[in-house]
Amino acid sequence: MAFTLYSLIQTAILCINAIAVLHEERFLSKFGFGVEQGVGGFGDDPGVKAQVLSLIRSVRTVMRVPLILVNSASIVLLLLFG
């Protein structure tokens, strides 16, 4: 298997898919990344956990429709060109 641009794009798509399917209440709360950890006071610097949770929420919110389109295009390209 060659190291190509398509394999890099496919790896990025798989990583974003992995982030997008994480569920806060079922999976993330077991590791301390639950809903209540995202609350901070005014003027406080958010910790690492709060920043990671914010990234996960952002990816789920912003990338929902583009992921559907990119996944579909990736599947079609893989089926056509092997």
Image (tube, helix red, strand yellow):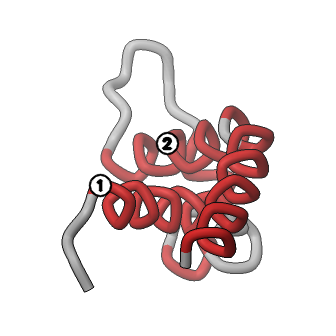
Secondary structure found at label 2: helix
Q: Residue at x 55, y 61 (%)?
A: 19
Above or below 66: residue 31:
below
Residue 22 in view: yes
Residue 34 in view: no
The CA span between labels 1 and 2 is: 25 Å
27 displayed left or right of 31: right
Counting from the top left corner in percent of width and height, residue 10 is at: 45, 63
Residue reaching furthest to the bottom:
1
Counting from the top left corner in percent of width and height, residue 70 is at: 66, 48
Q: Which mark is residue 27?
A: none
Picture quadrant of residue 51: top left
Q: Nearer the viewer, residue 66 or 55?
A: 66
Q: Looking at numbered disc 2 in the image, what kind of residue is underneath it?
A: Leu
Q: Residue at x 52, y 56 (%)?
A: 16
Q: Residue at x 26, y 86 (%)?
A: 1
Q: Looking at numbered disc 1 in the image, what kind of residue is underneath it?
A: Leu
Q: Nearer the viewer, residue 50 or 17?
A: 17
46 displayed left or right of 15: left
Q: Residues within 10 Å of mark 2 (few under 14, many from 20)?
A: few
14 displayed left or right of 23: left
Above or below 8: residue 43:
above
The residue pinned by badge 2 equals 55
The residue pinned by badge 1 equals 5
Question: Where, quadrant-wise, is the C terminus in this rendering?
Answer: bottom right
Secondary structure found at label 1: helix
Above or below 63: residue 71:
below
Which of the two discs, 1 and 2, sits closer to the camera? Answer: 1
Marks 2 and 1: in contact by CB < 8 Å?
no
